[in-house]
Image (cartoon, rainbow, N blue to C red):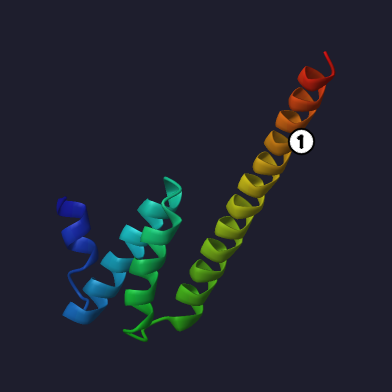
Amino acid sequence: MAHHHEENEHLSPEEIKFNDCIRRGDDLFNIHQYMASREHYNEALEMHFNDKLVNEKLALVTNKKGFETKTVLIILAVAVVIIAAVWIYKTQF
């Protein structure tokens, strides 16, 4: 923890808060908590310290969330096909 304190020694309270929001967002992103990470990135975006960085991180969240949604939809579609095939097979015999 001392290292973290030294890192923030020359920063304003607002910059410290910004860095904390980014760090929390990154931590949540790394454990696939995309919606929670988005909340922290949006909070950081409101501070306008490094909008480019925050917008890049928000784009990553959007991409991951989109991929996650597509994956779930594909799994559901496959499940429906399997259920239909089993139902058809059972009704024939």
Three-letter amino acid code at the position of disc 1: Val
Q: In this image, 55 relative to 27: left or right?
A: right
Most extreme residue toward the bottom is 48
Does residue 75 appear in the picture of this structure? yes
Q: In this image, 6 relative to 73: left or right?
A: left
Q: Compared to 91, does 75 lie above or below? A: below
Residue 75 at what x, y percent from top left? 66, 40
Q: Residue at x 56, y 65 (%)?
A: 62
Residue 77 at what x, y percent from top left? 71, 43
Q: Compared to 32, does 5 lie above or below? A: below
Mark 1 residue crowding within 10 angstroms, few (<14) / some (14–19) / many (20+): few
Instruction: Place residue 48 in its image quadrant.
Output: bottom left
Q: Residue at x 52, y 62 (%)?
A: 61
Q: Residue at x 50, y 67 (%)?
A: 57
- In this rendered view, identify the residue nearer to me: 27 or 66: 66
Most extreme residue toward the top is 93
Q: Compared to 6, does 91 lie above or below? A: above
Viewport quadrant of the C terminus: top right
Does residue 12 appear in the picture of this structure? no
Q: Compared to 65, does 82 lie above or below? A: above
Q: Quick one: SS at disc 1?
A: helix
- Would you name the residue on which mark 1 appears? 81
- In this rendered view, identify the residue nearer to me: 46 or 73: 73
Residue 34 at what x, y percent from top left? 45, 56
